[in-house]
Image (tube, rainbow, N blue to C red):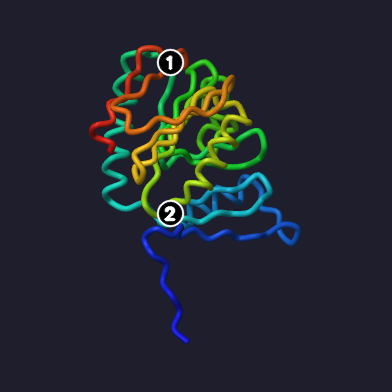
């Protein structure tokens, strides 16, 4: 019998269950990630380790455009710090997540001890972006966005390049779905920031 290889539309993620046999500490998880830099590794709230292969070149090129726009606004605004897709955060729930882009108020970031900032900082970003590629499960990304909101994110964008849709998550309202928008506003969380989606689609 021949094994069937996953198609490009199937999510190529591996979920490893350790609990209750092994409980990986925050320090051990960080070291584990350093030993396996070729993968994107996250931890779910329930303790499972999720291992994902790197994104495709095209998706990463689009994400680079997104991060570049956020970086420019962050430098001009000066009230916060921005992050790309390789940084991880330990959420209040215990989950460790690595959004494709994130932003945190400078005062909140600087309140974290320096030694904790060097690893997976114990904070949930105020703003997050997840950029869906063809191999990502939309259902799982939506669940991740809900997790961010539950843990303290005020504004989140799930950009679905496959269907050219954007799902806007806010801490104080229901999810808003946009069809093929040309831009997105940072609203009162990132005042003055407007993401031009022409280079992201």
Q: Nearer the viewer, residue 175 or 89?
A: 175
Viewer-closest of 165 and 132: 165
Query: Do tag 1 and tag 2 residues touch (Cβ < 8 Å)?
Result: no
Residue in the foreground of this view, choosing between 153 and 23:
153
Mark 1 or 2, nearer chain start: 2
Q: In which quarter of the image is residue 201?
A: top left
Q: Where is residue 73 in the image (x, y as percent from the top left)?
A: 32, 19
Up-down: is 95 above or below 122? Answer: below
**Viewed as shown, does residue 199 lie left or right of 50?**
left
Image location of residue 175, percent across then percent down: 53, 29
Name the foreground residue: 8 vs 99.
Answer: 8
Regarding mark 1 in the picture, which secondary structure is present there?
Answer: loop
Element under disc 2: loop
The image position of residue 72, as x and y in percent, is 29, 22
- Residue depicted at x 32% and y 20%: 194
* Residue furthest to the bottom: 1
Task: Please identify the quarter of the rendering in which residue 90 is found.
Answer: top right
Q: Is the residue 16 above or below the residue 40 in the image?
A: below
Residue drawn at the location 40% of the way across and 44% of the way down: 132
Distance Cα–Cα, label 1 vs label 2: 35 Å
Q: How crowded is mark 2: few (under 14 residues within 10 Å), some or many (20 or more)?
A: few
Say which mark, if any, is on residue 187.
1
Return the residue at label 2: 37
């Amino acid at each position: 019998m021949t094994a069937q290889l996953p198609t490009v539309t199937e999510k190529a993620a591996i979920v490893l269950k350790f609990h209750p046999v092994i409980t990986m500490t925050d320090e051990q998880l960080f070291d584990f990630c350093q030993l396996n830099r070729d993968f994107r590794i996250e931890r779910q709230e329930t303790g499972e380790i999720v291992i994902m292969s790197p994104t495709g070149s095209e998706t990463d090129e689009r994400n680079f455009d997104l991060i570049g726009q956020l970086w420019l606004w962050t430098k001009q605004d000066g009230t916060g710090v921005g992050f790309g897709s390789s940084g991880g955060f330990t959420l209040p729930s215990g989950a460790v997540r690595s959004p494709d882009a994130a932003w945190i108020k400078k005062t909140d970031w600087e309140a974290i001890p320096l030694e904790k900032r060097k690893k997976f900082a114990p904070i949930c970003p105020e703003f997050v972006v997840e950029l869906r590629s063809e191999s990502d499960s939309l259902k799982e990304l939506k669940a991740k966005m809900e997790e961010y909101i539950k843990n303290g994110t005020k504004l989140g964008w799930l950009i679905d390049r496959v269907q050219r849709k954007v799902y806007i998550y806010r801490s104080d309202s229901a999810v808003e779905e946009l069809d093929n928008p040309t831009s997105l506003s940072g609203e009162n969380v990132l005042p003055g920031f407007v993401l031009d989606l022409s280079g992201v689609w």
